[in-house]
Image (cartoon, grey):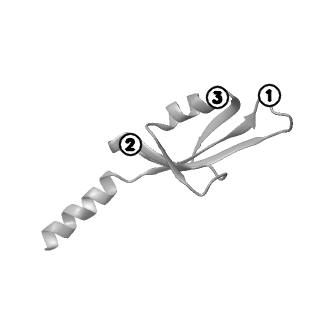
């Protein structure tokens, strides 16, 4: 059992997610509408989950860069990482 726990501990660190945010201002909006979302990126799995603050639901995407490209189509959006990886 100790070997199995050690293997699980290694997996936990191997797939540790990186925390990020995408923020900005929506273009062509009657008022200054804000874009603000937070996410966890699992680089070894090439997948992420994010929360946009507008709905109580989690969303999925592939990479933060692709998600940023999507939001840059209609917002002056920026990507911010919260770690040093």
In the visual, does 57 lie left or right of 16? right
Distance (Cα) linking label 1 and label 3 = 13 Å
Labelled disc at residue 43? 2
Q: Residues within 10 Å of mark 2 (few under 14, many from 20)?
A: some
In the visual, does 25 lie left or right of 57? right
For the residues bearing labels 2 and 1, Cβ distance under 8 angstroms = no
Q: Secondary structure at mark 1?
A: loop
List x then y, in percent, for residue 39.
53, 49
Q: Earlier in the sequence, mark 2 or mark 1?
A: 1
Residue at point 27% right, 57% down?
11
Labelled disc at residue 72? 3
Residue at point 38% right, 54% down?
16
Residue at point 20% right, 69% down?
5
In front: label 1 or label 3 = 1
Quadrant for residue 8, please give it: bottom left
Q: Is residue 71 visible?
A: yes
Give the residue at mark 1: 28
Quadrant for residue 22, please give it: top right
Q: Secondary structure at mark 2?
A: helix
Q: Nearer the viewer, residue 70 or 64?
A: 70
Distance (Cα) linking label 2 and label 1 = 33 Å
In the visual, does 47 lie left or right of 29? left
List x then y, in percent, for residue 76.
71, 30
For the residues bearing labels 1 and 3, Cβ distance under 8 angstroms = no
Distance (Cα) linking label 2 and label 3 = 22 Å
Q: Quadrant of the C terminus?
A: top left
The vertical placement of 2 against 24, above or below, is: below
Q: Residues within 10 Å of mark 3 (few under 14, many from 20)?
A: some
Q: Earlier in the sequence, mark 2 or mark 3?
A: 2
List x then y, in percent, for residue 12.
31, 59
């Amino acid at each position: 059992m100790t070997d199995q726990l050690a293997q699980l501990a290694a997996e936990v660190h191997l797939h540790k997610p990186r925390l990020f945010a995408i923020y900005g201002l929506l273009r062509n909006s009657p008022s200054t509408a804000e874009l603000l979302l937070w996410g966890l990126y699992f680089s070894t799995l090439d997948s992420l989950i994010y929360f946009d603050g507008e709905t109580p639901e989690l969303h999925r995407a592939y990479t933060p860069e692709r998600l940023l490209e999507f939001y840059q189509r209609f917002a002056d959006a920026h990507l911010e990482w919260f770690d040093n990886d």
